[in-house]
Image (cartoon, helix red, strand yellow):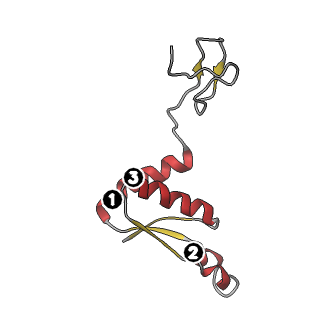
Amino acid sequence: MKLIYTHDNPFFVFNIRNILENNNIKCEVRNDILSSAAGEVPPTDVWPEIWVLHEKDYQKAEELVKLAIHGDTKATSWFCQNCNETNPPAFELCWCCGKDHKTK
């Protein structure tokens, strides 16, 4: 078992867990109920953690965590052929006309 991710916000930790599990990587959340010990121990010791159960999955898990945190750095804006507007890479539909960028 190997630590892959920790954060003070449980939302981020559980989101990473969901991403890993959806990619068939077995993992475990630890320290998710230790916040009551804050003040008695160093703050980072009570942050929730994600542990990857199998060493063979760690590299793939690392890539998925990096992608989840930083996004797809190769993504580029796209040009709507319908209304001639430029759209951010995260948009699947044109912000101006609502046309799907995958349809011609």
Query: Please, what secondary structure does the residue beneath circle 1 have?
Result: helix
In this rendering, the label closer to the viewer, 3 or 1: 3
| Among the 4 quarters of the image, the one containing residue 81 | top right
**Do the residues bearing badges 3 and 1 touch, measured as CB atoms within 8 Å?**
no
> Mark 3 belongs to which amino acid?
Asn
Q: Nearer the viewer, residue 46 or 33?
A: 33
> Mark 1 belongs to which amino acid?
Asp
**Residue at figure coordinates x 49%, y 58% from the top left:** 18
Q: Is 63 placed above or below 21 here?
A: above
> Mark 2 belongs to which amino acid?
Asp
Q: Residues within 10 Å of mark 3 (few under 14, many from 20)?
A: few
Query: Please, what secondary structure does the residue beneath circle 3 have?
Result: loop
Looking at marks 3 and 1 on the same chain, the residue that comes earlier in the sequence is marked by 3
In the image, farthest residue toward the bottom: 40
Q: Is residue 70 left or right of residue 3?
A: right
Q: Can you identify the residue that label 2 sits on? A: 32
- Residue 34: give x, y in percent of width and height: 60, 81
Q: Is residue 22 left or right of residue 98?
A: left
**Residue at figure coordinates x 49%, y 50% from the top left:** 66
Q: Is 46 placed above or below 4 here?
A: below
- Residue 102: give x, y in percent of width and height: 50, 22
- Residue 61: give x, y in percent of width and height: 40, 56
Query: Please, what secondary structure does the residue beneath circle 2 have?
Result: loop
Q: Is 40 placed above or below 57 here?
A: below
**Residue at figure coordinates x 42%, y 50% from the top left:** 63
Q: Residues within 10 Å of mark 1 (few under 14, many from 20)?
A: some
**Residue at figure coordinates x 66%, y 12% from the top left:** 83
Mark 3 and mark 1: span between their CA atoms? 10 Å
Q: Can you identify the residue that label 1 sits on? A: 57
Q: Which mark is residue 23?
A: 3
Quarter the N terminus occupies: bottom left
